[in-house]
Every structure is written in structure tokens, then in C-alpha cells.
Amino acid sequence: EADIYQTPRYLVIGTGKKITLECSQTMGHDKMYWYQQDPGMELHLIHYSYGVNSTEKGDLSSESTVSRIRTEHFPLTLESARPSHTSQYLCASSEMGTQYFGPGTRLLVL
Amino acid sequence: AQSVSQHNHHVILSEAASLELGCNYSYGGTVNLFWYVQYPGQHLQLLLKYFSGDPLVKGIKGFEAEFIKSKFSFNLRKPSVQWSDTAEYFCAVKAPLNDYKLSFGAGTTVTVRA
């Protein structure tokens, strides 16, 4: 089981603010992912990384950006938050084809 | 593109009842299959997975799932549920050569009444 940490767990901010959602894992997994989850809906992949300096966009279009400077760290940034960004954001890492998830960040943009 | 269908949006049952949650997928090739569970206020946890071999897979907490290739299905079962099984359950599918792509169903909320 992977140890994946996300901060903050909950965030309420105003429109136009820049925010960074943090994700760290301690298992040395090369592959990491960001998903967006809304109630009653499937998880949608918004970003993924195969390793340091590797980032790709997922299936769901997102105005967020990610970076992967260190193996254990995969932060997600929104330059200018909008109410449409209100959602839960889940970070995951994988090993041998199995993905392990962090606790998520619930974001509310007013 | 793969799609994953979970038949029930919300299931309500009493303790000791049997549970079966349906999951069907559309991908025609070899797949890896997963069930994840999300207890209230907690993160998604892996319940069980199927990569190859015996199509009847046993997971944690007394859950099992059966892969039926001809039906493109991977249904989750538990013979006797407990109140603590109240959670949301997600089926997920991955094509092995597609290393990043994990397709999720919309989830089934299970409420177990004491």
C-alpha cells in the first residue's frame, strides 16, 4: 500500500486566486496522476507523469498545470481559480499497474 | 475508448444481506480490472484486482469479484454485509498496454442499515 499525502484537505477561496494543491508519495513510484471527482460521477484523469520532468494532460480538459521536479512530489496549480473549478481533486501513484490514491483535496471556489 | 458501466447508482440493504454490484466494460482486448472502495470521509482504497489467472478474485474484508470475459463483466459480491460496508464502490478498467489509462465507472453508493 502506498503512502500518498495531499494538502490541503479542504480549501475555500475566492475567484481569481492562484492555488497549488500538494501531493507527495513516499514509495518512490515513478508514475503519478491527478483526477477530478464530482459527486455521482466517474473519476476523470486530468494530468499524469511517468517520472521526473515528464508531464502529460489527461482525458479531461483542465486549466490546471502540474510539475514533476522530484519523484515524490507532483503539485497541481490553478493560476486563476473560478467557480467551475469547484470539485474534489485526487492524487494517485502507481506500481505494477495498480494505482493508489491520496485522501483528496475538496476545493470550493466562491 | 473504454467505458465502464455500473448498473446501480444507490443500493440500500440490511445487515447480513448479500450484496452484488454489477460492472460492465466496453473494451474488447485484454484488460486489468479493479474495484475500489471509498468509505465516508476516507480515501479510495483498493478492494481487489484481476490481472490474469483464476477469474474469481478474493479481496479484503470478505469481498470477491468474478471476471466473465464473454460478458465483459466484473461483478463484486459479498455474502453477508455489515454496517461498516457502507461506502461508495468504484469499478475501474485498464488496458495493460495503456499504462496510464484507468477508466472508472460512476460508482455505486451502498448503504447498509443496522
Image (cartoon, helix red, strand yellow):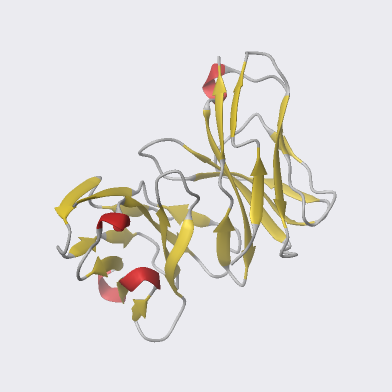
Question: Measured along the vertical axis of the image, is residue A110 above or below residue B6?
Answer: above
Quadrant housing the N terminus of chain A: bottom right
Image coordinates of residue B83 in percent, x first then y, are 26, 55
Residue A7 appearing in the image: yes
Residue at screen point 44% across, 62% down: B93
- The part of the image, by quadrant, that contains residue B68 is bottom left
Q: Residue at x 73, y 22 (%)?
A: A18
Where is residue A10 shown, x and y percent of the image?
A: 58, 31
User: Compared with residue A89, is residue A28 higher up or lower down, i.e. above or below?
Assistant: below
* Residue located 55% across and 57% down the image: B101
Left or right of residue A8: residue A107: left
In this image, A27 relative to A97: left or right?
right
Question: A75 above or below A17?
Answer: below
Measured as percent of width and height from the top left, residue B9 is found at 25, 45
Q: Which residue is outermost to the front?
A: B114
Q: Quadrant of the C terminus of chain A?
A: top right
Query: Residue placed farthest to the bottom in the image?
Result: B53
Q: Could you say which quadrant of the image residue A82 lies in?
A: top right
Q: Pinpoint residue A31: horizontal percent, then vertical percent.
A: 69, 59
Residue appearing at x 67%, y 32% in the figure: A64
Total marks placed: 0
Task: Tell me if residue A78 can be seen.
Answer: no
Q: Nearer the viewer, residue B100 or B47?
A: B47
